[in-house]
Image (cartoon, rainbow, N blue to C red):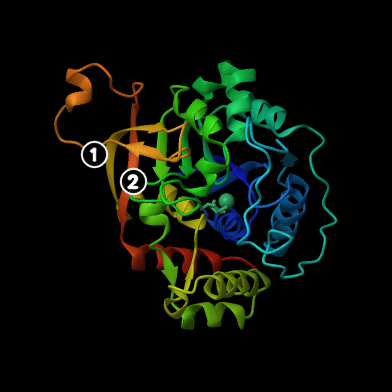
């Protein structure tokens, strides 16, 4: 099985680990990478993404800059990825050039040119995807699935109830969810669980390959930043969404109605309806806007994903 994928990223310490995974995995063909403002500015995201492709010894994959801010909200870069968005690790600036097209045009061209279905792995605020679906609705049929890191059925990180990618651009997430494209939500319920043991992170950081050393440094940055779990290792973060593509059997998944809250203190929350029976909202007709059922990952075999991550990174130079 070969998965044709486009990554949409805000590289990003953990986006970097996801890019390493996707480039390394033998069943994944990365058609292109589109960049969006999120963890850091879109210019930083592009530079960081090109530098990670260098470290991975990746082929010439097109990388394009996209939206510079969310649809409605101002830019609100994350505070947990360092000033450059890459943990201030000081990676050398890449000699690669970004694709001259805007991310929306690169997405459109890759989707329309592909003779097989394409999976979009969305690891960032979904501003690019929303603009694509509004500008080129005809591409919806060309997207096999949007597998997105975002949302939560069990509490937030950016706010008590909202996960960063959805919180950063709630309207974009709502537009993508309502576009009728099959979607798979890899949210905080599983994202927060998958960590690498400190000994394995040390072995990567001190190991023989440039990619492994980068992954180890990124994991150690995560550990240092994560006072709660730092004694248990570093989170692979967005890389878990790539694991979800190639090994979905390690996840407990339910098909549930999900909608994005756009107003009030819970703005940016993904409201995941896990009720087993109709509630008063359906009886009295004052229920929330109709929500589309999507696949939601609710639990994960952590050692299985951790092993997959380590074995895949080990394939890189
Ligand atoms: O909430 C986690 C998401 O926000 C990940 O995509 C990570 O990159 C952070 O930006
Ligand atoms: Ca990200």
**Number of numbered discs visible in the structure rendering:** 2
Question: For residue 80, which quarter of the picture?
Answer: bottom right
On the image, the x and y values in percent for residue 48 come to 73, 56
155 left or right of 35 in image: left
The residue drawn where x is 64% and y is 75% is 213
Q: Assign a secondary structure to mark 1.
A: loop
Q: Quadrant of the N terminus?
A: top left
Q: What residue is shown with label 2?
A: 153
Q: Residue at x 47, y 76 (%)?
A: 230
The outermost residue toward the front is: 264
The residue at label 2 has a CB less than 8 Å from ligand 1: no
Badge 2: how crowded within 10 Å, few (<14), some, or many (20+)? many
Which quadrant of the figure contains the C terminus?
A: bottom right
**Disc 1 and disc 2 in contact, CB within 8 angstroms:** yes
Find residue 257 and report its image quarter: top left
> Is 69 rendered above or below residue 251?
above
- Label number found at residue 181: none
In the picture of the structure, the residue carrying the numbered disc 1 is: 274
Tell me where residue 169 sits by quadrant.
top right
Of mark 1 and mark 2, the one earlier in the sequence is 2
Q: Position of residue 147 (x, y in %)?
A: 46, 40
Q: Residues within 10 Å of mark 1 (few under 14, many from 20)?
A: few
Callout 2: helix, strand or loop? loop
Q: Is residue 235 visible?
A: yes
Q: Is residue 286 left or right of residue 193?
A: left
Residue 222 appears at what percent x and percent y?
Answer: 55, 69
Q: Is residue 122 visible?
A: no
Q: Nearer the viewer, residue 165 or 72?
A: 72
143 shown above or below 6: above
């Amino acid at each position: 099985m070969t998965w044709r994928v486009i990554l949409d990223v805000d590289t990003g310490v953990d986006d970097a680990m996801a890019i390493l995974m996707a480039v390394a995995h033998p069943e994944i063909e990365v058609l292109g990478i589109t960049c969006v403002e999120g963890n850091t500015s879109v210019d930083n995201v592009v530079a960081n993404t090109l530098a990670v492709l260098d470290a991975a010894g990746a082929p010439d994959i097109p990388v394009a800059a996209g939206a510079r801010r969310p649809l409605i909200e101002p830019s609100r870069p994350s505070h947990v990825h360092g000033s450059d968005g890459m943990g201030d690790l000081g990676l050398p600036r890449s000699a690669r050039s970004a694709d001259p097209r805007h991310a929306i045009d690169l997405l459109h061209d890759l989707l329309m040119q592909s003779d097989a279905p394409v999976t979009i792995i969305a690891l960032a605020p979904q501003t690019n995807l929303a603009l694509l679906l509004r500008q080129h609705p005809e591409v919806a049929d060309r997207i096999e699935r949007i597998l997105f890191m975002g949302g939560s059925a069990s509490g937030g990180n950016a706010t008590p109830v909202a996960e960063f990618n959805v919180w950063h651009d709630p309207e974009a997430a709502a537009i993508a969810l309502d576009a009728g494209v099959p979607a798979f939500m890899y949210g905080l319920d599983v994202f927060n669980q998958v960590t690498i043991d400190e000994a394995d992170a040390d072995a990567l950081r001190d190991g023989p390959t440039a990619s492994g050393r980068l992954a180890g440094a990124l994991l150690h940055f995560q550990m240092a930043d994560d006072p709660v779990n730092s004694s248990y290792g570093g989170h692979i973060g967005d890389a878990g969404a790539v694991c979800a593509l190639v090994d979905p059997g390690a996840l407990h998944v339910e098909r549930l109605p999900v909608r994005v809250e756009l107003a009030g203190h819970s703005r940016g929350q993904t409201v995941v309806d896990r009720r087993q029976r109709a509630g008063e909202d359906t009886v009295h007709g004052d229920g929330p806007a109709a929500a589309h059922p999507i696949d939601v990952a609710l639990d994960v075999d952590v050692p299985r994903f951790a092993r997959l991550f380590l074995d895949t990174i080990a394939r890189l130079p």
